[in-house]
Amino acid sequence: QVQLVESGGGLVQPGGSLRLSCAASRSIFSFNAMGWYRQAPGKQRELVAAVTSGGNTNYADSVKGRFTISRDNAKNTVYLQMNSLKPEDTAVYYCNVKLTVALLNYDYWGQGTQVTVSS
């Protein structure tokens, strides 16, 4: 089992910045990947950014150049730095972990944190 606790969401004006944090209850060193997803009202959950255990990153086209994902293995934490925020970035953001144990793949999710971009 893995518990994930997100923080850092809130209300920000367009063009502003936020940094989301996701702290895991155990070492993230063995996780296949950690990532951030978001879900806006009436829309499906979508991948925002992910980082693999090897440090490879992947971003949604809509956030490339504005968001940066990083992980701190020593703190068991993954971050999402969000700059130049737009109203369309408004959503609930979820932390996700992918883990393989005994050849079985597992997905764990945080409880979500609300990000609202509005003037």
Image: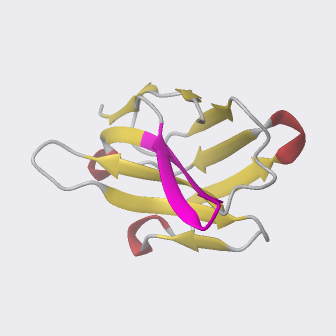
Q: Is residue 78 visible?
A: yes
Q: Nearer the viewer, residue 3 or 45?
A: 3
Please name the residue shown 15% across and 42% down the image: 41
Identify the image quadrant of residue 25. Answer: top right
Residue 50 position, x and y percent, is: 57, 62
Instruction: Kindly give the residue lying farthest to the front in the view shown.
Output: 102
Question: Magenta segment, principal secondary structure?
Answer: strand
Give the residue drawn at x 44%, y 70%: 60
Q: Looking at the image, which residue sits at the far right? A: 74
Whole-percent x and y of residue 59? Answer: 52, 70
The magenta-colored residue range is 94-109
Whether residue 71 is situated above or below residue 114 in the rendered picture:
below
Q: Quadrant of the N terminus?
A: top right
Residue 72: x and y in percent read: 82, 45
Question: Relative to 64, is 33 above or below?
Answer: above
**In the image, is 96 to the left or to the right of 31?**
left
Residue 100's image quarter?
Answer: bottom right
Residue extending furthest toward the left:
42
Residue drawn 43% across and 41% down? 94
Q: Position of residue 21 (x, y in %)?
A: 63, 34
Any magenta on residue 17?
A: no
**Position above or below: 45 against 51:** above
Residue 86 in view, yes or no: no
Residue 100 shown in magenta: yes
